[in-house]
Amino acid sequence: MSSESAQTDPYQKRLAKLAENFNALKSDDTAYDIVQKALGSKPLTMNDEWEIHEKLTAGGKDSPKYKERLKQGFIPLAINKAFAYSYLNVPLIDLIEPLIESLDFAANSIIEVVDHPARLSFVMEEVIERRMSMLLEEFGLDLVSPQELKEMISSGRKSEAEQIMSTLDVLERKVLERHLNDEGLETVPNTSIELYEKAYASALKKLRRPKTR
């Protein structure tokens, strides 16, 4: 696959991101083996999704094989979602395993709610998002990740993002905005690296969803 195709293919992009996350993972981390194994995942294609939907709709003895293929295709996305919250004081494996389990459940029941192949990806991605929200609630961490906040802003939900960032002080906000703009953890004028990193860590812990009644 060409580099241009890899940049636009969501499955290839997920594997590329997974490789990036894996390279930052310590070899003694309890999630190391499961992430390493996921790097060998075979990316799905649009044709795969149509074939999977067709086979699962028809049923038969090959159904378990295609359910597993669907699940494996989305494991990189699930693991990347867990990495997005790796700054929390929660073992990475405690996020990864439940997300993968949710894919297992989804793959076994998805054909009951998906009437068209084009919706397979949408539903599987939604399952991951919902399971992560449940995990954050279970851990008492109703937080928003920087990546989610970035997507919120880019999708036109700026007022919601502003509400979430309203608890940040001036330096925390400035540091976070540099990160969201992909400027990296570089120094803000007249701010040391140590102070910058401290402000960023503090900002992450304040990115909580507004309480709803």
Image (tube, grey):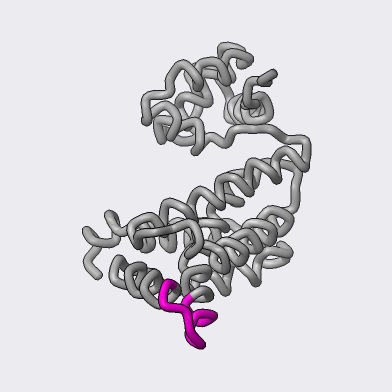
At 63% from the left and 20% from the top, the residue drawn is 210
Q: Residue 173 in the image: x percent, y percent?
A: 54, 18
Relative vertical location of residue 10 with respect to residue 62 in this rendering, above or below? above
Q: Residue 37 in the image: x percent, y percent?
A: 57, 74
- In this view, the residue in front, 101 or 67, is 67
At 68% from the left and 20% from the top, the residue drawn is 211
Outermost residue toward the bottom in this view: 61
Relative vertical location of residue 15 with respect to residue 126 in this rendering, above or below? below
Relative vertical location of residue 74 with respect to residue 211 in this rendering, above or below? below
Relative vertical location of residue 126 with respect to residue 2 in this rendering, above or below? above
- The quadrant of the image that shows the C terminus is top right
Instruction: Magenta stretch: give its range.
Output: 57-66
Residue 49 quadrant: bottom left
- In this view, the residue in front, 21 or 186, is 21
At 71% from the left and 62% from the top, the residue drawn is 29
Q: Residue 198 in the image: x percent, y percent?
A: 66, 28
- The quadrant of the image that shows the N terminus is bottom left
From the image, give the main secondary structure of the stretch colored magenta.
helix
Q: Residue 140 in the image: x percent, y percent?
A: 77, 36
